[in-house]
């Protein structure tokens, strides 16, 4: 599982900072999460192949999270894309995109599917044999969801030496990987635990931007490996959180701690501060394992 | 009169090239012309003050000419803009912007006026005491206008020595500047040509992007000082012009020559070519005074 930050700053794109967008690669699937203006250029800069992106997850319809999507959709067409593209996001995202395509007399060279959300409970929005994605309802000025990306538990790994020693036929291997004990021809029962060992633990990533501090999300993100949580402000500007419906670094760290997350990744920084290191320092007063997102940064988990 | 090229490449934004946008400063007025994705960042990079832009002219609703506008409109609000903003462009541009503002539950901190165009004849879209702007109907896949920006003729300049020698009272100066002869108290008539000299010739700039080769525009742009004309292709790809409704460098030069333009500025280059110098070489086989637009280039005319 790895993550490329394309942009992680609040509000407006600037010469050296980009609005929110990131690419999560999990079990060989590439998911684009949010798509602020300039995302297609950031994808190119970070050498991410456009054709590998088949699913886009948009948290909410504020410009700094979605204004780059229409350009990306259009560019895919100009490049002759054939693969389906699935866009998951709040109700209204389809209208927002189609009005622009209609008025520019454009169309897509591929099938473009919109999966619009309007529920206030966590729901599954994507699932295949390896990965499951759920919404994390957030509290913001407009309808907003974070997303929880989880690897599905892998099958158990064979102790190949043991299995061969017992002379077990290969046709039983899948059954063993699925967790079964095995009865040999002589009647002995070999327990699964003797024949297998644990696969790597499935990994998970929670993306939470933008949101007011909310403990309601804790049951959804409990024990997550990596929590990306917005920290627009430092504690000194905590008084702005209620009005703008954003969080501080300290609040993000509190959520990470209470959710028993392994790593906390901070982002959505207001550009009012001189150094983003201040966010890390503040968060680490509450939770040790903090990393800072930054445009172009690559994380491997 | 000066011009800053923010972007001048066709189709999609790339790491080092931007879609169409430029800023014309004429008689101290700043006009933004077209607004592809990334324009707001290009404005910052080129140190153009957002607050000086009060009029935006959009040629057509293809993404590479308009997808940066909603971000700019939003950023103006985030910065607390108070000045009115006027957007001139094809019918539909208002819907395109308002749907996005509505769905992101955003509004502007300033008055935002749309001036929608749908006529097929040249028309005046802006006029004040110093400058007049007209449409240049173009031939493209969707409804498209170029724009002709013209300084109004200035008043005549006084030969101040002459005027004083004749003892003419200052209350007549404005009349003389407006072109009148003067009758002195002793009855002598002094011709205006003796008292004044020509002001600098009014300058003009024609922006023509995107378009199929069309001589219909010649009467509108006749004798223009600077003609920006798209040249998406070289002559070797002339066969693509009809289908895509674009022009070659040679065709742009032919228009410049037939319009008796002083300068030709080429832009809207397809990124398929190794060097944009090829466009200049081709155009100069027809018209001598050719310059190449390029992102970040500044021209003073």
Image (spheres, coloured by chain):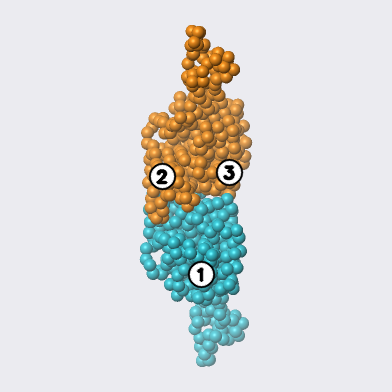
Chain colours: A cyan, B orange
What residue is shown with label 1? A251
Q: Which of these two is toward me, A80 or B75?
A: B75
Within 10 Å of disc 2 (Cα), the crowding (few <14, some 14-19, many 20+) is some
In the image, residue B112 sits, relative to residue B3, either above or below, namely below
Q: Residue at x 51, y 45 (%)?
A: B50
The numbered mark, 2 or 3, whose residue comes first in the sequence reads 3
Marks 2 and 1 share the same chain: no
Q: Secondary structure at mark 3?
A: loop
Residue B46 bears which disc, if any? 3
Q: Secondary structure at mark 2?
A: strand
Q: Residue sitting at 56 percent across and 38 percent down?
A: B4
| Front one among B9 and A191 | B9
Residue, disc 2: B112
Q: Position of residue A226 (x, y in %)?
A: 54, 70
Q: Chain of mark 1?
A: A
Q: Point out the frontmost of discs 2 and 3.
A: 2
Distance from Cα at disc 3 to Cα at disc 1: 38 Å
Circles 2 and 3: CB atoms closer than 8 Å: no
Q: Residue at x 53, y 39 (%)?
A: B22
């Amino acid at each position: 599982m790895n993550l490329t930050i394309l942009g992680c700053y609040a509000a407006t794109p600037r010469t050296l900072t980009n609005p929110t967008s990131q690419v999560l690669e999990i079990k060989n699937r590439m998911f684009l999460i949010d798509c602020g203006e300039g995302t297609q250029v950031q994808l190119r800069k970070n050498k991410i192949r456009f054709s590998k992106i088949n699913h886009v997850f948009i948290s909410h319809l504020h410009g700094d999270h979605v204004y780059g999507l229409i350009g990306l959709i259009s560019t895919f067409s100009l490049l002759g894309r054939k693969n389906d593209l699935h866009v998951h996001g709040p109700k209204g995202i389809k209208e927002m995109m189609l009005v622009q395509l209609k008025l520019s007399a454009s169309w897509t060279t591929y099938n473009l599917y919109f999966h619009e959300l309007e529920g206030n409970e966590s729901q599954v929005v994507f699932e295949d044999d390896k990965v499951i994605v759920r919404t994390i309802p957030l509290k913001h000025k407009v309808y907003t969801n974070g997303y929880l990306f989880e690897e599905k538990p892998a099958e158990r790994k064979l102790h190949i030496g043991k299995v061969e020693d017992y002379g077990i036929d290969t046709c039983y291997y899948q059954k063993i990987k699925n967790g079964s004990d095995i009865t040999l021809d002589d009647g002995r029962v070999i327990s699964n635990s003797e024949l297998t060992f644990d696969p790597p633990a499935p990994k998970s990533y929670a993306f939470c931007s933008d949101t007011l501090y909310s403990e309601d999300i804790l049951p959804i993100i409990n024990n997550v490996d990596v929590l990306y949580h917005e920290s627009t402000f430092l504690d000194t500007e905590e008084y702005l959180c209620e009005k703008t419906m954003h969080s501080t670094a300290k609040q993000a760290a509190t959520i990470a701690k209470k959710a028993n997350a392994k790593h906390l990744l901070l982002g959505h920084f207001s550009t009012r501060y001189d150094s983003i290191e201040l966010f890390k320092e503040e968060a680490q007063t509450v939770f040790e394992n903090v990393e800072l997102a930054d445009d172009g940064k690559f994380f491997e988990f």
